[in-house]
Image: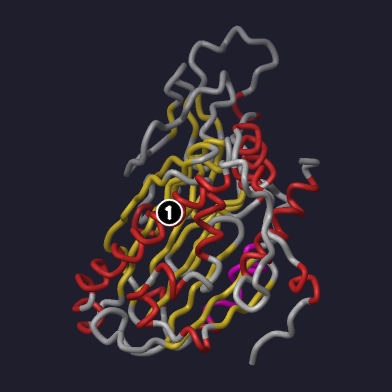
Amino acid sequence: MSQPMDPALRIATALPARYYVGDAMQRAEQTAVFAKSWQLVAHVGQLAAPGDHIVEHIGAVPILVLRDEDGVLRAFPNVCKHRAGPLAHCNGHGARALHCKYHGWTYRLDGTLRSAPEMQDAEDFHVEDIRLTAFRVVEWQGLIFVAIDPKTPAFDALYGDIVARIAPLDISAMRFTRRDSYDIDCNWKVYIDNYLEGYHLPHVHPGLSKVLDYRIYDTTLSPWKSLQHSPLRNSADIYGEGDAFYYFVYPNVMLNIMPGRLQTNRILPLGPERCRVEFDYYYAQDEAALARIARDQEFSDEVQQEDIDICVAVQKGLASGHYDAGRLCPKRESGLWHFHTQLREAYAAAQL
C-alpha cells in the first residue's frame, strides 16, 4: 500500500547548485551532517577478537573502534589526551593496550590511562583521572556503527524496523566476501541523489530495468531513511527470485538487499567535487547464493559504471553556471526530496 503524497512534494525543487561545489560547503557538512549521524565503520569480522581495532574518520574526527578484553565494542577519538597524537595509525589485531605514537602515553582498551612516561614532576597530575571520550557504538546484523554526537537519535530510530520488513531474508547470516571502492569526480550528494530515485532507470540502466519492475517500483519514506522496493524478474542467475530492497539511511549509508545477498554502500566526501563509494558484499552461505556471486559481480560492475558516468556528467552540469534548482517529479523522486529536506534542516540548524 503506497503512502499518501505529501503536498510539499508536489511543489518541490532540488537543492540549488551552490550546495554541490566549493570547499566551504564541504567543511561545513563535516560538522553539520556527518558528525551528527550514525556512521557505518566496519563489519564484525574486522573486530572479531579482543584487541582487534580499526581507524576511521567521522566528519573531521579521527576515531578508533576496538573490541576490549571482555568482548565489548568501544569507540574513542583516535587522539591522545596529552598532545593530540594518534593512538593507532592503521587497522590491527590483538592489541593489549593503546600506545600514543607521539609520546608513548598508554591507555587500556577500556580507554583509561595506564601510564604517562616521565610525568612524575607534574603537579596535581593523576593517571587515574584521565580517560578517552567514549562514543556510542552498535553492532547490528553483523555491521558496526558509531555516533560521535550525543544528540544523534537512538540507533533503533534509524535501523530498528528493517529486519521485520525484509523477512524472511536474514542478513545476519550473510558473510563478508569483498569490497569494491570507487573514487568518483562528483560531490557526494550527487551520487546519493542518483541512488534515491528510479526515475533514471529506463534511460541509464537498460540491463537493470529488465530485472526491476519499473511499473510497480515504489518508495516508502520514514524518519531518517527511505526504502525503494521492487519485485525481481528475469534475475534467477543474478539475484535469484524474490524482491529487491534498496534502503538509504541518512546521510550516507545504503543497504541493497536481495535474496541471499547484502551490499552495503558508504559514500565519503573526498573534496567538494569528488567522493569515494565503498561497496561491501555479503552473501548467504547456501549453494544457490554462492553460485550467483560471479554473475552478481559482473552485473553490479556494469550498473556501477553507468551510475559513475551519469554522476560525473551531472557534476559538470551543476558547476556550469547554467543550472540552479529544478523541479522534482513527485511520483519518482520522493526519496530525493526526503533527503534534501533533511539536509535543508541540517543546514538551517548550522546556519549555512
- What residue is rendered at 39% in x and 55% in y? 309
| Rendered position, 122 above or below 15 | above
Spot occupied by residue 271 in the image (x, y as percentages of width and height): 51, 37
- What residue is rendered at 54% in x and 53% in y? 190
- What residue is rendered at 70% in x and 16% in y? 124
| Rendered position, 241 above or below 274 | below
Provide the secondary structure element on which disc 1 rests. Answer: strand
In which quadrant is the C terminus drawn? top right
Q: What amino acid is labelled 1 in the image?
A: Ala
In which quadrant is the N terminus drawn? bottom right
Residue that protrudes farthest toward the front in the picture: 322
Q: Is residue 132 left or right of residue 179?
A: right
- 159 inside magenta stretch: yes
| Rendered position, 146 above or below 162 | above
Residue that protrudes farthest toward the top in the picture: 121
Q: Residues within 10 Å of mark 1 (few under 14, many from 20)?
A: many
Q: Nearer the viewer, residue 350 or 162?
A: 350
Residue that protrudes farthest toward the bottom in the picture: 1
Spot occupied by residue 78 in the image (x, y as percentages of width and height): 51, 34
Spot occupied by residue 27 in the image (x, y as percentages of width and height): 62, 35
- 140 inside magenta stretch: no
Range of the magenta residues? Answer: 155-163
Q: Nearer the viewer, residue 93 or 339?
A: 339
Report the predominant secondary structure element of the magenta stretch.
Answer: helix
- What residue is rendered at 19% in x and 78% in y? 291
Residue indicated by mark 1: 42
